[in-house]
Image: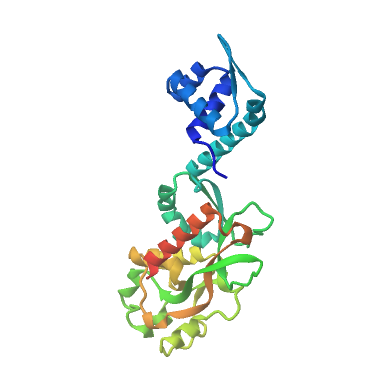
């Protein structure tokens, strides 16, 4: 349907609301004569009179009264649409669940970058070992580690992980330097038992065999930790040789706090880091912003 000129409709709505050409002109920053001209243009277009002009006032005709309500609602809808267009879709509170080790070693040190890119988003990280119920708890999304088994969620693989021997640089010197693989027997092995709940995970022996190191583990001294970040810290402090997750340990490798004495022993894990949210939220702008950010950060770190 062909509509009258928008300026004429705006002039009519303002004049009808104020019942005054002068006040309508002040609102629209034009002259009363311009309002009068626009009204005449609209009346000519419609073929009906809209105002009854008296000495000191104007009155609406029945035709004007019939259309005014719909026109006012139309302008309100337009205003709402403009407001939505101007609103920042990347805003609000974003609740993210992640494992404590991933939060401490990787996410927390980088999160300031996400906040700088999206200042209107307040990120809240809920760290815990338990897989939260994204369907029923007030959590928007999760960064998880393990097999991607939940078909009821939207999931996306972020990065594959692997295990590799790591130690403090201090263990590369001295009488039993780990520059020589035969000295493994003189060092304590650090175990990250947070992996024990995942089936078919490589063991220390698997890693040594994978790297071609002929050393059979027997009664070797060991320390076990049920949290990965504790095992990593023990290795940084020089307590022994850790079979650590590359994704979690890369920041410490890059900073020189950990080194890999036997790079050929790096062995794939049977689990991945992945992103998860309920399917209904997969296209939410705030959640998409976080997902794209974390993918980019992982790409830049591990490419």
Q: Quadrant location of residue 166?
A: bottom left
Name the spot of residue 268 as percent of width and height, x first. Answer: 48, 79
Name the spot of residue 83 as percent of width and height, x first. Answer: 52, 39
The residue at the far left in this view is 173
Quarter of the image containing the C terminus? bottom left
At horizontal 57% and vertical 71% (from top left) the residue drawn is 146
Quarter of the image containing the N terminus? top right
Name the spot of residue 91 as percent of width and height, x first. Answer: 51, 45
Is 280 on the left or on the right of 12, as rendered? Answer: right
Q: Quadrant location of residue 197?
A: bottom right
Residue 153 higher or lower than 56, as above or below? below
Front residue (pair 130, 51): 51
Q: Is residue 105 visible?
A: no
Coloured how? rainbow
Front residue (pair 171, 193): 193
Is 16 on the left or on the right of 114, as rendered? Answer: right
The residue at the far right in this view is 136
Q: How many marks?
A: 0
At horizontal 58% and vertical 81% (from top left) the residue drawn is 200
Q: Is residue 162 visible?
A: yes
């Amino acid at each position: 349907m062909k509509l009258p000129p928008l300026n004429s409709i705006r002039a009519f709505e303002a004049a009808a609301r104020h019942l005054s050409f002068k006040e309508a002109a002040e609102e629209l920053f034009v002259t009363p004569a311009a309002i009068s001209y626009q009204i005449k243009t609209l009346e000519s277009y419609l073929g009906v009179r809209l105002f009854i002009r008296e000495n000191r006032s104007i009155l609406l005709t029945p035709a004007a009264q019939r259309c005014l309500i719909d026109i006012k609602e139309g302008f309100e809808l337009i205003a709402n649409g403009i407001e939505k267009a101007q609103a920042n879709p990347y805003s609000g509170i974003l609740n993210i669940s992640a494992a404590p080790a991933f939060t401490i070693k990787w996410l927390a040190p980088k999160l300031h970058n996400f906040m700088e890119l999206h200042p209107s988003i307040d990120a809240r990280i809920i760290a815990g070992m338990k897989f939260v119920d994204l369907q029923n708890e007030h959590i928007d999304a999760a960064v998880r580690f393990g097999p991607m088994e939940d078909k009821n969620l939207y999931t996306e693989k972020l990065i594959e992980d692997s295990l590799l021997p790591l130690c403090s640089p201090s263990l590369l010197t001295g009488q039993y330097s780990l520059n020589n693989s035969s000295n493994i027997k003189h060092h304590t092995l650090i175990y990250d038992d947070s992996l024990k709940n995942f089936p078919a995970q490589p063991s220390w022996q698997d890693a040594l065999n994978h790297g071609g190191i002929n050393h059979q583990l027997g009664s070797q001294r060991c320390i076990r930790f049920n949290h990965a970040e504790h095992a990593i810290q023990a290795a940084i402090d020089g307590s022994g040789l850790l079979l650590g997750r590359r994704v979690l340990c890369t920041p410490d490798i890059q900073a020189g706090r950990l080194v890999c004495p036997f790079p050929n022993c790096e062995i794939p894990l049977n689990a991945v880091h992945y992103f998860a949210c309920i399917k209904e939220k997969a296209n939410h702008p705030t959640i998409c912003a976080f997902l794209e950010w974390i993918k980019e950060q992982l790409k830049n770190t591990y490419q």
